[in-house]
Every structure is written in structure tokens, then in C-alpha cells.
Image (cartoon, helix red, strand yellow):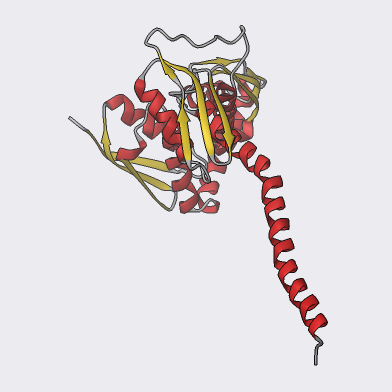
Amino acid sequence: MLSHIHKTIFSAVLLFVPMSMSCNVLAADKSSQPLTDARQEAQIWTTYALSPYLRANDLKVTVVDGKATLSGGVAEDVDKDLAKQIALGVSGIKEVDNQIKVNADYKPTKNKEGERSYGQAVDDMSITAVVKSKLLWSKHSDGLATNVDTLAGKVTLKGSADSDAAKALAGVLAKNTHGVMSVDNQLKVKKAESDKVAKNSKKSAKDEDMGDKVSDGWITTKVKSTFIYSSNVDSSDISVSTKDGIVTLTGKVDSGAERELATELAQNIKGVKSVESAELTNKS
């Protein structure tokens, strides 16, 4: 049986322990808050930098205890509101003090010549990745040794190709990619004409065999992806199905030129034996 003194000490310990634990938790919370603030600031700023509507503006963000303060300038009220909504969409942001000024004559600070913003750099990297993927899916990829570089939407292709057709196709695939402004096709055809004819003959036979090896599902996925990444084909209006290497395209196109491009892009995917596009009809 505990004595009165022991009971008093025991009660004091029980009272002290939760108090000390609470203090430790509060201390931990306070020490981690600056990291949380920094993470939220980075998330908001990165979203601004990647947004095609906000990236050109000189916006600044600070976050303290879940409150984001926005400053800088934009030309439209809608851009100011967009900046606020983006900040509110970040987990943990409870309040936004939107101090962004709207000025119809606002002109953002221009980058130095040849210098890219973060958003532009990401765009260029994305374009490079897409072009590389499209070239990799192509029937002519075995005949390509290609280096792809993108600067401000200008794609440069360097390396070698086994034929003029392979070089030309690489240029077409790059040009018809979202965000591409121009293509500098520096690929060099390395084979003699006689060698190219023999190579193309072997490639045709190889493509026939490829149709048996590449799954129909893989072909359908790559054709759809190629359309999605292509700036001159409306992928949302075209359905793709594949059976035994034969691709069927159905849906609507804006013009005969779009139908021809869709057919050409599908035809040049590995494993495709033929493309049926008779059911691609004009919207009008």
C-alpha cells in the first residue's frame, strides 16, 4: 500500500509525463513547420512555372503556418484568381493573402537571350522525350541512330539513318509533336543506294514477321499514343483497334489531310501490317 508521500509523488509523475510528452510534440511540430512551409512554397511556385497562363509572370510565394502570401504582377484578373486557386489547392494551405497586382500594361521581365525559364526547360525536355518515344516505336528505328535535342520548341535531330525514307519519317514524327515550333533534321544517310534497297527489302520481310511477334494490344497503345502526341491529329475523335497486325481507324477527322497523316503515323508503328481508314469520315 502506497504511503501518502508516495501517492503524491506518483500523482505528480503521472501529471508530468503527459505534459512533457505534449511539450515534445509541440516542439516537434514547430521544428517541422518550416519544412512544411518550404515544401508548400515549392509546390505552388512549380505549378506557376509550369502553367502556360502564369509562367511568364514574375510571381512570388511565401508560406507561413498554412497561410500563403502571393505577390507580383499579372495582366488579367483571371490570372490573379487562377494563382489564388492553385495555392488553395495545395494540401495544408488554409488561407491565401493575394497581393498580386493587376495591370493591363504589365510586361514580365524577359529572360536573357538563350536563357530558358523553368517551365520552358520542362517543355523542351517533354518534347525531347516524346520525339524519342515516337522514333523508338517506328518501323525505321532499327535504321536510326538519333540524338534529339530541343531548345525553345526547336527540335534538332542528329545522327544517322539507313535511308532517305527513314530520315524523312523522323522529321515528320518530330514536326507533328505538340509544342514543336520547327525541326532541324541533320540526320545523315549512311548507306549507298544499292545497300538501302537491300536493307529495305529485308526490313519489309522483318516487318511482316514483326506483326506476329508484337501484340495487337501493344500496337493499339502505341498508335493511340502517337496520335495523342501529334499536333495535327485529333486523337479524341479517332478510335483504334488492331487484329492480327491490321489496324482499323474509325471516327471523325477535319480533313483528308488529317486522315492521310493518321494513316501514315499508324502505318509506321512497329508490327503494323496494314491500316484500314475508310471509316475515318470528315466532320462536316
Give the percent coordinates (x, y) of residue 224.
42, 42
Q: Is residue 16 left or right of residue 199?
A: right
Give the percent coordinates (x, y) of residue 2.
80, 88
Q: Nearer the viewer, residue 271 or 261?
A: 261
Q: Quadrant of the N terminus?
A: bottom right
**Would residue 169 be seen by someone viewing this image from the given angle?**
no
In the rendered image, the residue lying farthest to the left is 284
Give the percent coordinates (x, y) of residue 126.
56, 30
Please say if 25 is above or below 78: below
Q: Residue at x 54, y 34 (%)?
A: 44
Give the percent coordinates (x, y) of residue 49.
54, 26
Number of dots carrying numbers:
0
Please say if 2 is above or below 209: below
Q: Residue at x 57, y 42 (%)?
A: 206
Q: Is residue 16 left or right of residue 168?
A: right
Q: Residue at x 40, y 47 (%)?
A: 246
In the rendered image, the residue lying farthest to the front is 4
Q: Nearer the viewer, residue 35 or 45?
A: 35
Please say if 20 is above or below 104: below
Q: Quadrant of the C terminus?
A: top left
Q: Quadrant of residue 138?
A: top right
**Would residue 184 be seen by someone viewing this image from the given angle?**
yes
Q: Is residue 186 left or right of residue 103?
A: right
In the rendered image, the residue lying farthest to the bottom is 1
Q: Residue at x 49, y 39 (%)?
A: 269
